[in-house]
Image (cartoon, helix red, strand yellow):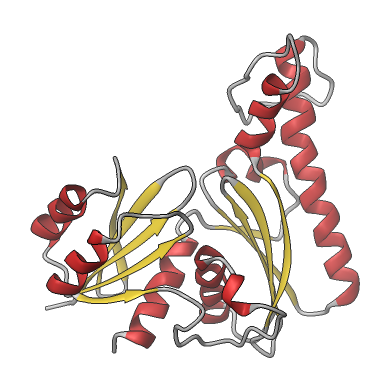
């Protein structure tokens, strides 16, 4: 019988979990909050043997106690055992989500230079070379931040809902905003990819996060899009730290 692992990803916008049967994802869940009750429901339903938490927020510390009492639990941090090194100035400041993405890249593409682009509240550019060194990258405002900031910092611009159907030349206020924001992100990503490609051979690009549905169709071919990449990285880290 396969071991069940709960992998939690607590981001700034969403709190999510993936349930693994062995090394396969059975299902993913969006949690309503970080309460003990919400996590207890998952434990009762799926009866996991292992769990791991990646969190970039100030989450409820009681859930760590709950998971430790009911599973072999690991809290992802710079102290975790990783399949790569972090030769940067302050490794303790690297976000747990970025560590999970780097772990996934090394696990699935171990012989390549990898640029992992996470499309969440922020867009993170995470570079892991073929020697399995996480060298850093970049952070820029995510899709929702850009859309909402136009409304917040102007008198008349509305908050526009994201859409993958974006014209190059906007024909009204909404489509002008969508063109500027979504295609602006596309050109930002492609610009970064071009710069990395000039510096590194045998180069791989991975795109993940909830907003890839709005962007993937506009990007050049040769980019691997996987919305569940962070969970796969969390599972790999859990197996290393909870053998």
Please determine whether, in this image, residue 242 is positioned above or below residue 15.
Answer: below
Q: Residue at x 20, y 54 (%)?
A: 39
Q: Taking 8 as reference, is 182 left or right?
A: right
Q: Taking 218 as reference, is 164 left or right?
A: left
> In the current view of this chain or complex, which residue is farthest to the right?
198
Please determine whether, in this image, residue 5 is positioned above or below residue 9.
Answer: below
Quadrant where the image shows the N terminus: bottom left
| Picture coordinates of residue 89, whole percent (x, y) | 72, 80
Query: Which image quarter: residue 194?
Result: bottom right
User: What count of labels does the image hold?
Assistant: 0
Q: Residue at x 13, y 71 (%)?
A: 70
| Picture coordinates of residue 97, whole percent (x, y) | 51, 63
Q: Residue at x 69, y 90 (%)?
A: 131
Quadrant where the image shows the C terminus: bottom left
Q: Taking 108 as reference, is 2 left or right?
A: left
Return the residue nearer the eye: 105 or 57: 57
| Picture coordinates of residue 66, whole percent (x, y) | 17, 65
Return the residue nearer the eye: 118 or 225: 118
Q: Residue at x 64, y 38 (%)?
A: 143
Q: Taking 230 as reference, is 185 left or right?
A: right
Please determine whether, in this image, residue 14 is positioned above or below residue 153.
Answer: below
């Amino acid at each position: 019988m396969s071991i069940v692992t709960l992998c939690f990803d607590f981001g700034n916008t969403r709190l999510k979990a993936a349930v693994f049967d062995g090394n396969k994802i059975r299902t993913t869940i969006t949690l309503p909050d970080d309460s003990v009750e919400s996590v207890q429901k998952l434990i009762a339903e799926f009866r996991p043997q292992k769990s791991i938490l990646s969190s970039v927020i100030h989450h409820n510390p009681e859930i760590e106690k709950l998971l430790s009492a009911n599973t072999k639990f690991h809290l992802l941090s710079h102290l975790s055992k990783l399949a790569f090194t972090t030769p940067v100035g302050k490794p303790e400041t690297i976000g747990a989500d970025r560590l999970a993405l780097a772990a996934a890249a090394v696990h699935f593409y171990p012989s390549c230079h990898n640029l992992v682009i996470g499309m969440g509240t922020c867009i993170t550019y995470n570079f892991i070379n073929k020697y399995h060194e996480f060298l850093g990258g970049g952070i820029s405002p995510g899709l929702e931040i850009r859309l909402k900031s136009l409304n917040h910092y102007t008198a008349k611009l509305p908050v526009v809902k994201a859409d993958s159907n974006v014209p190059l030349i906007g024909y009204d206020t909404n489509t002008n905003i969508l063109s500027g924001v979504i295609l602006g992100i596309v050109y930002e990503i492609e610009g970064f990819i071009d710069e990395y490609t000039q510096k590194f051979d045998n180069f791989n690009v991975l795109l993940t996060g909830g907003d890839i549905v709005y962007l993937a169709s506009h990007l050049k071919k040769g980019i691997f899009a996987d919305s569940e990449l962070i969970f796969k990285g969390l599972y790999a880290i859990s197996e290393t730290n909870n053998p």
